């Protein structure tokens, strides 16, 4: 496109400046310059001391020209309907120049003229007009003594064009001539490049600021899944590129990005409309020119589509002509600030018949709006205008001055040029009342002064930075439905790019969303992942599309849309929702729980049983059965069994340093004391039989003193083992965090495993030794043989503790303690029941057997 434009520019330039009639033999003073081709007539013009050019897209389209390269092409001309808003822009330029000419402060004594053209919003026409404004309109003129045809009739500056693409083409043409161009509506960020466009200025902010503002708006409302449409032009493509780049940095995903232009075939427009209808994105960001947006809205209105929240750029969102599309109610966007231009409305409505008839553009506008014909000879099928048409009652963008936005940009552009001319002309004279209009200036001087202008007009500051851009300030506008049902453009906030980050937006009133909603619509590819889950990207889709996966065991996420889950501390565990860490429940064998109560009951019951047994034995201590069973060792055994039952209570409750040391040592010592007594009784039984043999007197070595010494010696060894254990590495309370992930087990660490197994091993050794001796004495010929009872008791004892080892090792948590208590109680009950229950039965229920004679009888079997 740019290559064809450049070729077209070169051809026009060559044709415009090459032919000189003086080449036929005229001398220098009679040299004439002749323009080639036919000049395009202006829409509005007026002569003046200095002429300002204007280019506006008053019509939508340019007539298609066919080239056969055999005949001269027909002149370029505009077609289609008139853009009433663009007509208002051009008339506002006329108003501003007339206001300046009537001013006594700005350019006193100097009049500004204007040549305003219609570019049809097309590049070829804009390029042609750029050359025409550079060369002047006189078909034949004398260049003077400087022999320079290119300097005759050159305008001082140009206001326009409305679109970015035509403005780019114009700037490339007039830039080499140093003719300043001040656009009121060309927002492409590319035009800020002073190396490519050195003479370009604008009173409207660059799209770079608008793109950033739109991204911040999308981010503020929480939209992460959007659609994007743009004009297939420099304005749309560059503006959308800036937006998409900023959106990507903010983590905003774009479902689709479609481009179109109003001259594209309808099939292309239909395809874009269908993409919008089938999309899942609720929000659509449109970087589209007003004329293009009208075409798209007309296509969308032909077939209903799901509700969409439109977010628009200033090019269309403030165009009052588009408010008729009711399905776009709730649209929001960035708009240029409103302004008040005193006297403009009266000027626009001052259209007498003579003025309208004198201008083809105004005539076309009048006939289009009132649906009548002014020219009687051309009236074919339409009624003639009879003079009753009242423009005061006309509802049109041309007459609508309630929302002066871009119009004010035109107004400021004209005043900026006037100030630059004033500084170039009037500063050379000392008079402040009147400027020297005789002194001629060149456009280059105006360009220099334009870079330095700084003034205020109607309360609005006007200045340009190094890139020719103004300070970026916008209004946030909203399409709201009024009480009458019509859609109105309402200002709901402001944006100032010069404010600190995070403070640029200020929303001053409530917004209305699509379908008249009051809640911000959601537009996300995937709903936010709640706390307790993490995001997992879906393969082949943008980062905004993901699955919400629950956090794995032991991990949580406490924020929405968390990218990862993190583990809880060692002493905490996730709740059921896995969105917070709770302290792990502490578990130990408590005496208040069912298992603890049962074990404690058996422990106390066993101790009571031992005490009752001791009481029975003490009551019948002189009976033969008690005397025959070594009453002293029996009482010591019952005492040790009582301690064995009670020591199980030390295993209950929360472990402490003292309880941990006490429970294992008390258990070890009391059981050794118990087994020592049983062992003593077994030895006494065995030795007593041996002593009855002829020639034996062994009992003298196993009397009561020796029995006591045996019990003390065996017990002392266990005490010594326990002391060494407690000194070297005693048991200590600990929090077991590994057995269960979700709870803490309070338990006693062994300290030294060797010490623990030494205590158990010593008990087992004594029990085994006692069991062997009891087995040896089980067949002695007494009627009442205590060795048999000891054998059964030791058999139960050993079986219990052999089964205890694997059960202890494999039991989790507090059940380890319960297994140990159960082993203590089971072995204790085995001892007391096997050894003492038969004797108590005889004492209490069979007293006839409690005689020396009965005890001394041999078993008849």
Image (spheres, helix red, strand yellow):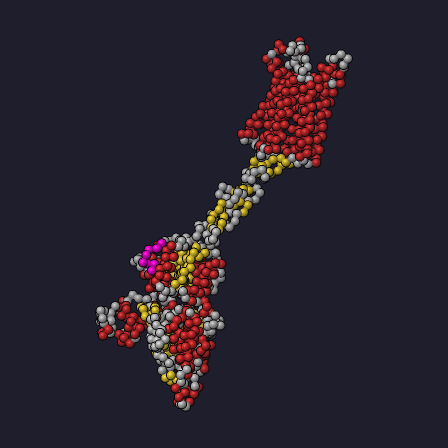
The image quarter containing residue 339 is: bottom left
Q: Quadrant of residue 306?
A: bottom left
Residue 244 pos. (x, y %): 45, 60
Residue 9 in the image: x percent, y percent?
41, 75
Is 707 part of what is drawn in magenta?
A: no
Task: Characterize the magenta stretch by its predominant secondary structure.
Answer: loop
Please say whether residue 506 is visible from this viewpoint.
no
> Can you see residue 548?
yes
| x and y, in percent, of residue 386 in the image | 22, 71
Magenta highlight range: 299-308
Q: Quadrant of the N terminus?
A: bottom left
Count of numbered labels shown in the rendering: 0
Residue depicted at x 50% and y 44%: 578
Say above or below: 36 vs 808: below
Q: Pinpoint residue 42: horizontal percent, then vertical percent.
A: 34, 76
Left or right? Give the position of 48 relative to 817: left
Residue found 63% across the figure and 21% down from its top: 793
Left/right placement of residue 638 relative to residue 519 reads right
**Which quarter of the image is occupied by the C terminus?**
top right
Residue drawn at (67%, 19%), measured in percent from left and top?
A: 775
Residue 300 in the magenta stretch? The answer is: yes
- For image coordinates 60% across by 30% down, the residue present is 807
Name which quarter of the figure residue 665 lies in: top right
Residue placed most toward the observer, 104 or 584: 584
In the depicted structure, whether residue 294 falls above or below residue 517 = below
């Amino acid at each position: 496109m740019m290559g064809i434009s450049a070729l077209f520019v070169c051809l026009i330039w060559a044709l415009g400046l090459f032919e000189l009639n003086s080449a036929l033999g005229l001398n220098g003073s009679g040299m004439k310059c002749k323009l080639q081709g036919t000049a395009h007539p202006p829409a509005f013009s007026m002569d003046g001391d200095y002429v300002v050019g204007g280019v506006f897209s008053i019509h939508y389209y340019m007539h298609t020209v066919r080239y056969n390269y055999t005949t001269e092409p027909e002149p370029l001309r505009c077609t289609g309907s008139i853009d009433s808003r663009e007509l208002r822009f051009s008339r506002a330029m006329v108003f501003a120049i007339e206001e300046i000419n009537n001013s006594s402060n700005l350019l006193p004594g100097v009049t500004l003229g204007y040549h305003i053209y219609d570019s049809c919003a097309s590049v070829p026409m804009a390029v042609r007009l750029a050359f025409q404004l550079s060369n002047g309109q006189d078909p034949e003129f004398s260049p003077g003594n400087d022999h320079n045809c290119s300097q005759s009739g050159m305008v001082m500056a140009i206001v326009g064009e409305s679109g970015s693409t035509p403005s780019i083409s114009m700037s490339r043409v007039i830039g080499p001539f140093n003719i300043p161009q001040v656009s009121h509506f060309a927002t492409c960020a590319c035009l800020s490049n002073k190396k490519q466009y050195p003479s370009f200025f604008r009173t409207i902010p660059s799209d770079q600021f608008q793109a950033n503002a739109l991204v911040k708006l999308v981010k503020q409302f929480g939209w992460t899944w959007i659609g994007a449409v743009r004009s297939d032009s420099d304005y749309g493509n560059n503006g959308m590129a800036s937006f998409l780049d900023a959106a990507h940095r903010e983590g905003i995903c774009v479902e689709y990005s479609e481009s179109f232009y109003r001259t594209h075939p309808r099939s292309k427009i239909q395809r874009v409309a269908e993409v919008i209808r089938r999309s899942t994105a609720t929000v659509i960001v449109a970087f589209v020119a007003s004329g293009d947006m009208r075409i798209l809205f007309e296509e969308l209105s032909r077939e209903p589509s799901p509700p969409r929240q439109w977010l628009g750029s200033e090019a269309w969102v403030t165009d009052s002509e588009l408010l008729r599309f009711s399905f776009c109610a709730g649209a929001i966007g960035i708009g240029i600030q409103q302004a008040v231009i005193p006297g403009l409305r009266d000027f626009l409505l001052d259209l007498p018949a003579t003025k309208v008839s004198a201008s083809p553009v105004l005539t076309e506008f009048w006939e289009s709006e009132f649906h009548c014909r002014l020219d009687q000879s051309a009236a074919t099928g339409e009624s003639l205008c009879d003079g009753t048409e009242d423009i005061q009652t006309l509802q049109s963008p041309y007459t609508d001055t309630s929302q002066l936005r871009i119009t004010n940009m035109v107004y400021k552009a004209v005043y900026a040029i006037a100030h630059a001319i004033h500084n170039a002309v009037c500063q050379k004279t000392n008079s402040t009342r009147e400027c020297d209009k005789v002194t001629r200036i060149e456009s280059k001087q105006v360009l220099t002064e334009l870079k330095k202008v700084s003034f205020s007009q109607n309360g609005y500051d006007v200045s340009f930075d190094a890139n020719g851009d103004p300070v970026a300030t916008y209004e946030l506008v909203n399409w709201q439905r009024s009480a009458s049902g019509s859609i109105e453009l309402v200002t709901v906030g402001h944006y100032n790019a010069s404010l600190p980050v995070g403070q640029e937006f200020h929303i001053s009133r409530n917004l209305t969303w699509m379908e008249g909603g009051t809640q911000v619509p959601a537009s996300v590819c995937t709903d936010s992942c709640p706390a307790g889950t993490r995001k997992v990207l879906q393969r082949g889709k943008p980062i905004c599309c993901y699955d919400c996966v629950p956090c794995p065991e032991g991990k949580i996420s406490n924020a929405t849309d968390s990218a990862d889950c993190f583990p809880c501390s060692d002493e905490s565990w996730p709740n059921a929702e896995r969105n917070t860490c709770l302290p792990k429940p502490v578990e130990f064998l408590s005496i208040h729980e069912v298992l603890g109560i049962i074990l404690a009951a058996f422990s106390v019951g066993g101790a009571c049983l031992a005490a009752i047994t001791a009481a029975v034995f003490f009551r019948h201590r002189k009976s033969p059965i008690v005397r025959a069973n070594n009453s002293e060792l029996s009482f010591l055994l019952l005492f040790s069994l009582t301690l064995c039952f009670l020591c199980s209570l030390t295993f209950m409750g929360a472990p402490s340093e003292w309880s941990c040391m006490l429970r294992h040592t008390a258990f070890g010592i009391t059981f050794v004391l118990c087994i020592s007594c049983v062992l003593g009784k077994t030895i006494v039984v065995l030795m007593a039989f041996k002593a009855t043999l002829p020639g034996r007197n062994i009992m003298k070595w196993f009397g009561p003193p020796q029995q006591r010494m045996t019990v003390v010696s065996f017990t002392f060894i266990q005490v010594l083992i326990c002391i060494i254990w407690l000194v070297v590495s005693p048991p200590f309370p600990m929090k077991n965090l590994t057995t269960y992930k979700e709870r803490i087990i309070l338990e006693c660490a062994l300290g030294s495993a060797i010490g623990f197994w030494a205590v158990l091993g010593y008990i087992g050794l004594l029990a085994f030794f006692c069991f062997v001796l009891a087995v040896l004495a089980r067949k002695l010929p007494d009627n009442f043989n205590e060795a048999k009872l000891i054998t059964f008791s030791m058999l139960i004892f050993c079986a219990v503790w052999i089964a205890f080892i694997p059960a202890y090792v494999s039991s989790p948590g507090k059940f380890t303690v319960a297994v140990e208590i159960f082993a203590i109680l089971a072995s204790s009950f085995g001892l007391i029941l096997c050894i003492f229950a038969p004797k108590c039965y005889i004492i209490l229920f069979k007293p006839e057997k409690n005689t020396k004679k009965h005890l001394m009888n041999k078993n008849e079997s």
